[in-house]
Each structure stands twice: as C-alpha cells, then as structure tokens.
C-alpha cells in the first residue's frame, strides 16, 4: 500500500481545489460536461448564437479544450456591430482590465508556494507603503493622519 502512495503525484491545495471546482461545474451544468466528454457542442453553439442574435455581443468566439485533444472553436457574429467582418480564430479582441486576474493568480501561486501570505502587509514588498496616511473627513479638512490598519 505504501508503495502505491509513494507513486502518487504530490497534489497541492490548488490542484485539489481546482479539481473540486471542475467537478462542481460539471455537476451544476451537466450539458457542458456531456459536451466536453462527447465533443457535441450543440448546446454551447446555441448559446453563443443566442448571445449574438440578441445583440448582447457583436461577435463571440469560444475555444473549448479537453485533455490533449485539439481545441474546438465555436464562433458567431462579427467583430463589431458596424464591422461586417466575421469572427474567426485570427480575430483580434480588445481585452480590458486583465491585470487584476493575472495579478491575483500570480499572488495565489506565491501563496501556494509559501512565499506570500494573504494577510501580509504590502509594506513588506513596497517600503513606501509603510507609513500610510489617510483623510478622516475630506469635507472638513485635508489633514492626513496615520492609518491604523
């Protein structure tokens, strides 16, 4: 038995939580799980086309991957409502506010590696934040006082 346990890969908290999240996603959306397992993306294609038809988006391209299989692409609509160019795998998209999720994932990786704590003061990394000051009532005074937390 111990020989089998020694051959099991080391699983981090991130792997376990990610797997649990995927299982929860598949349980909550059995149609999506079935689509990923069978390669029949009719449900997802219908939703993409519905978003475009209802003009929630001008165009949408979905890339679905499962294991080592080549990703399936589902596209509908145009680059913009006033641009008749259909979306495809080579479409360029403007993606805003992506710094937050990327920085968040990087921070969680550092937490998982033990190099960062969730409640660690930012001043440990950026000394300029060590002596933060705040306004208590900007309507009455612009005098800053040392921050308590």
Image (cartoon, grey):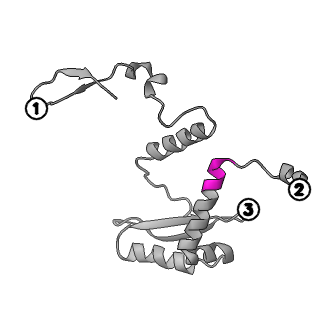
Where residue 139 is drawn, which disc sits there?
Answer: 1
Please state the horizontal and vertical placement of residue 5, each as a whole percent of the image: 84, 52
Q: Residues within 10 Å of mark 2 (few under 14, many from 20)?
A: few
Camera-side residue of 21 and 106: 21
**Residue drawn where x is 57% and y is 72% of the image:** 27
Which mark is first along the chain, 1 or 3?
3
- From what the image shows, is residue 120 above or below residue 47? above
Q: Is residue 14 magenta?
A: yes
Q: Is residue 108 magenta?
A: no
Camera-side residue of 60 and 67: 67
Instruction: Name the mark nearer the viewer: 2 or 1.
Output: 2
Question: In the displayed image of the protein, which residue is found farthest to the left?
Answer: 140
Please state the horizontal and vertical placement of residue 90, each as a whole percent of the image: 55, 59
**Residue drawn where x is 35% and y is 19% of the image:** 131
Q: Quadrant of the N terminus?
A: bottom right
Q: Residues within 10 Å of mark 3 (few under 14, many from 20)?
A: few
What secondary structure is found at the residue carrying circle 3? loop
Q: Which portion, as a residue range, is magenta?
A: 12-17
Q: CA distance from mark 3 to mark 2?
A: 31 Å
Which mark is first along the chain, 1 or 2?
2
Residue 85 appearing in the image = no
Instruction: Name the mark nearer the viewer: 3 or 2.
Output: 2
Where residue 1 is drawn, which disc sits there?
Answer: 2
What secondary structure is found at the residue carrying circle 1? loop
Where residue 68 is drawn, which disc sits there?
Answer: 3
Q: CA distance from mark 2 to mark 1?
A: 69 Å
Q: Are marks 2 and 1 in contact (CB under 8 Å)?
A: no
Name the chief secondary structure element in magenta. Answer: helix
Please state the horizontal and vertical placement of residue 145, each as a whole percent of the image: 23, 21
Q: Residues within 10 Å of mark 1 (few under 14, many from 20)?
A: few
On the picture, is 129 further left or further right than 13? Answer: left
On the picture, is 141 further left or further right than 8? Answer: left
């Amino acid at each position: 038995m111990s020989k089998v346990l020694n051959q099991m890969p080391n699983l981090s908290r991130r792997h376990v939580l990610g797997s649990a999240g995927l299982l929860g996603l598949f349980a909550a959306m059995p149609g999506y799980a079935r689509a990923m397992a069978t390669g029949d993306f009719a449900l997802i294609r219908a939703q993409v086309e519905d978003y475009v038809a209802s003009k929630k988006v001008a165009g949408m391209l979905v890339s679905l991957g499962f294991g080592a299989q080549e990703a399936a692409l589902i596209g509908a609509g145009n680059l913009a409502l006033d641009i008749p160019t259909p979306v495809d795998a080579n479409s360029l998209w403007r993606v805003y506010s992506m710094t937050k999720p990327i920085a968040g994932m990087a921070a969680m990786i550092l937490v998982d590696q033990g190099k960062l704590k969730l409640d660690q003061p930012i001043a440990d990394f950026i000394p300029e934040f060590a002596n933060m000051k705040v306004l208590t009532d900007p309507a009455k005074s612009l005098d800053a006082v040392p921050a308590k937390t």
